Image (spheres, grey):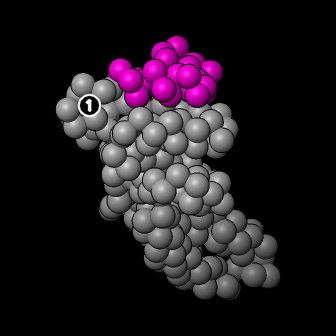
Amino acid sequence: MESVVALFREPQQAQGALQTLLQRGFDRDHLGFALTDVVAQEDIAQQTGVSPEAGQPAGSAAVLKGAWLGILGGLVLTVPIWLLLLIIPATKIYAYGGVLGILFGVIGGAALGGLFGALAGSDHGDFVNLLRRMGVPAEQAEKFYGGMKGGHVMVIARDPSGQRADEALSVMRKHGAVKLEDAVGAGQLQSERH
């Protein structure tokens, strides 16, 4: 299966490309799109009948990243207070309580960070892994995802037979697929076959 991936500056361009692909007989189940604007995403889905891509679940990486950020946040909030307790002579007797505050800040930060990491990972998923599974090289997958995070709309057309990928690529270019360098500074055409 070949896949064609493209980025568009405007949701209307992506919508036009999807509608043209549908008119040319591409199967709705082999088309997808993704963007960070939920309202625009819902509009495109309603206008075209094409489901937005969910990406792969971010999994444990998002939970661990959230936990580490929570620990860091807990330390940033509690260590300065503890240092003030040590520096000010009248408050030195409370320094042990400050150590317990640091401990609770780290534990609470890790728990909340892990929870928010899990929730954030389940919303948008991991588009880099999704693109990698479709055959997009890692560096380009990162750039496509970076363009999407920068406000561009990513459109994906899968061609099970591999015979209509050039047609899909032509349609996407006609509807304004931007160059990757224009979206993220990379230097390759924004719409690519994989």
Seen in the image, is 41 located left or right of residue 193?
A: right
Seen in the image, is 115 located left or right of residue 153?
A: left
Name the kind of residue labelled 1 in the image.
Answer: Glu
Asked whether the viewer can see residue 62, the reply is: yes
Between residues 153 and 86, which one lies in front from this camera angle?
153
Residue 124 included in the magenta stretch of the image: no
The quadrant the N terminus occupies is top left
From which residue to which does the magenta span run?
A: 166-193
**x 42%, y 47%: residue:** 32
Between residues 6 and 91, which one lies in front from this camera angle?
6
| Image position, residue 105 (x, y; %) | 56, 76
**x 46%, y 40%: residue:** 23
Asked whether the viewer can see residue 103, the reply is: no
Between residues 58 and 76, which one lies in front from this camera angle?
58
Residue 167 included in the magenta stretch of the image: yes
According to the picture, the residue beneath numbered tag 1 turns out to be 2
In this rendering, the answer to whether 97 lies above or below 74 is below
The quadrant the C terminus occupies is top left
**x 36%, y 40%: residue:** 26
Between residues 91 and 131, which one lies in front from this camera angle?
131
| Image position, residue 142 (x, y; %) | 44, 34
In this rendering, the answer to whether 122 lies above or below 108 is above
Q: Secondary structure at mark 1?
A: strand
**Callout 1 crowding tier (Cα within 10 Å): few <14, some 14–19, many ≥20:** some
| Image position, residue 62 (x, y; %) | 41, 59
In this rendering, the answer to whether 82 lies above or below 33 is below
**Residue 162 occupies which quadrant of the picture?**
top left
